[in-house]
Amino acid sequence: MQLRVSNPGRGPHSVIGPIAVNRAEPGNVLESRYQSIRPYEWGAVFNNPGSLGTGLLPQDYAQAQIKYVDLDLGAMTGRFLPNISIPLKPFQGILGVSPLDGYFPPVSPGVTNSVPPGPHASNLDLNELSEGSTLYIPVWKPGALIYTGDTHAVQRDGEISLAALETRLKELRIQVILNKQKNLAWPVAETDAHWIVIGLDKDLNVAMTLAERNAIKFLATRAKISELDAYALCSIAVSFRVTQVVDIVRGVHALIPKAIFAPDLRREMTVV
């Protein structure tokens, strides 16, 4: 609570970076591969006092709470209560680059607010971005200036109270590959099972519309099908989920299953 009050306009996150990427220029894409995410043996989930207006239901819960959870990294579970255990899936809530001008006003010259995600990725809170996944991020400024933080032991879609199971890491390894002149307008994630496209806006309805349009564009350009066919395919095969609703802008992500495409086509459907 004191961090929020003492640093108005700034995110409460612990962030590593920014780190410049050699030869990265606007119009490039960073291919960021999560190779290792190793947390410590504890985590915490919390809600702020209702008076701060954070989380989805500050009007319902005036009382703040911090709940600490022991993590069993062998079994990959967290002991929420003596008779409730949560499967763990560590991931970084934040991985981003310097944002494009005008998307959100800077806190001060050269200082970016870590709370709202955007076309520069940042605080996506997308729980699919665990070990083995890849996040493709458009570059908006020379050097890209990549940064990461907001470590989660687990979070499901929504992040309702404002917090995931927050923790810190013993080790984080991300391989960054620079793709020249690829021109993505929005971040795209990839796992073994899905391509994942994003929609973000303060209005959840608008975020949903953006996610749908981005999914249609992805399918039409990568699978070489018409936009009408892509529209229909989204309705019967693509899952749209609410990523988070607590970070100024709200997020929707569309999971496009790879398994529905013939192997030859699947191999051709690269993000970059």
Image (cartoon, rainbow, N blue to C red):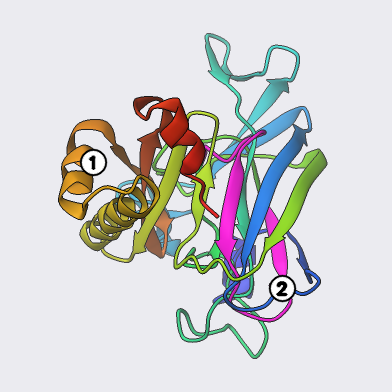
Which labelled disc corresponds to residue 53?
none
Drawn side of residue 148 relative to residue 50, left or right: right
Name the kind of residue labelled 2 in the image.
Ala
Secondary structure under tag 2 reads loop
Crowd rating for badge 2 (residues with CA inside 10 Å; few <14, some 14–19, many 20+): many
Residues at circles 2 and 1 in contact by the CB criterion of under 8 Å: no
State the extent of the magenta-drawn residues as a range. 127-149
Residue depicted at 75% across the width and 42% down the height:
168
Q: Which residue sits furthest top?
A: 83
Name the kind of residue labelled 1 in the image.
Cys
According to the picture, the residue beneath numbered tag 1 turns out to be 234
Image quadrant in which you'd find residue 143 = bottom right
Residue depicted at 72% across the width and 72% down the height:
145
Give the main secondary structure, helix, strand or loop, of the magenta stretch: loop
Percent from the top left, x then y, of residue 52?
45, 63
The relative height of residue 250 versus residue 106 in the rendered view (above or below) is above
Percent from the top left, x then y, of residue 204?
26, 57
Residue depicted at 45% across the width and 27% down the height:
263
Q: Is residue 71 magenta?
A: no
Percent from the top left, x then y, of residue 80?
56, 21
Depth check: 9 or 87 in front?
87
The relative height of residue 264 versus residue 63 in the rendered view (above or below) is above
Is residue 68 among the parts visible in the rendering? yes
Q: Locate the N terminus by quadrant.
A: bottom right
Image quadrant in which you'd find residue 30 = bottom right
Q: Which residue sits furthest front?
A: 264
Crowd rating for badge 1 (residues with CA inside 10 Å; few <14, some 14–19, many 20+): many
- From mark 2 to mark 1, how far is it between C-alphas? 33 Å
Q: Is residue 146 magenta?
A: yes
Q: Give the mark nearer the N terminus: 2 vs 1.
A: 2
Percent from the top left, x then y, of residue 214?
33, 57
According to the picture, the residue beneath numbered tag 2 turns out to be 24
